Amino acid sequence: MSSMRMSLVIPCYNEARNLPLLVARLRETFVRDDIEAILVDNGSTDDSPAVLDALLRSPSRIRSVRVEKNQGYGFGILAGLAAAFIVFYTNSVSPSAHGNFYELYAIAAAVLGGCSLRGGEGSVLGIVLGVVLLQILQNLVNLLGIPSSLNFAVMGTVILLGVIADRQFMLRRQRLDGLARVEAGSQ
């Protein structure tokens, strides 16, 4: 399979009757290997999920993403774009495996970016820097030849070190605040 160059994201809500025609037209149109279609079932309440499962059983460049509860048209598009980005990042299409353990990466990036796991602190810039640091860390793991099976252990260690550092900073801040109160009371 060549790498994807373009992904077409199509939100579908209660389109069970139209899906067979849509999939047939997409199969006729997509003759190149570097183009894919992502049909986002945006919380349909009709038979759309079953119809998509039946139509997309064989491997193809057309796949579906299921959003359990309809959260609006824009959410369906964003869910499809997220699926496209994951495909670009992993260079593979396996709907049952996409998104597994990505919450661990999100927590690690937030901790690296300076967010406290106890809440109340953090910034968007810090999280962006955390994501960059996490990607550098993952690349370093690959370059050092550490087996990919230990990748989650490395991320867990990063989170643990972040929690320990956060705790130490909090204790230091409390000590300094206590000293400042004592000094202010004695004057």
Image (tube, helix red, strand yellow):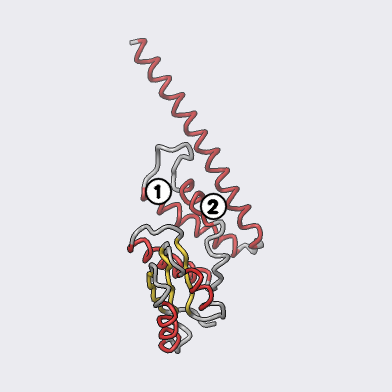
Quarter of the image with the N terminus is bottom right
Placement of 141 over or under 29, stated as above or below:
above
Marks counted in the figure total 2
Q: Is residue 118 left or right of residue 180?
A: right
Q: What residue lies at 56% left-to-right and 48% top-to-bottom? A: 158
Mark 2 or mark 1: which comes first in sequence? 2
Q: Is residue 116 left or right of residue 124?
A: right
| Nearer-the-camera pick, 139 or 4 | 4
Q: What residue lies at 50% left-to-right and 55% top-to-bottom? A: 134
Q: What residue lies at 43% left-to-right and 79% top-to-bottom? A: 5
SS at mark 2 in the image: helix
Q: Residue 172 at what x, y percent from top left?
A: 47, 29
- Return the residue at label 2: 104
Q: Is residue 147 left or right of residue 121?
A: right
Q: Residue 46 at what x, y percent from top left?
A: 43, 66
Foreground: disc 2 or disc 1: 2
Rendered image quadrant of residue 29: bottom left
Quarter of the image with the C terminus is top left
| Nearer-the-camera pick, 52 or 32 | 52
Rendered image quadrant of residue 76: bottom left
Kindly identify the amino acid type of the residue bearing the numbered disc 1. Gly
| Nearer-the-camera pick, 78 or 104 | 78
Q: Residue 19 at what x, y percent from top left?
A: 42, 77
- Return the residue at label 1: 126
Distance between the alpha carbons at the discs numbered 2 and 1: 17 Å
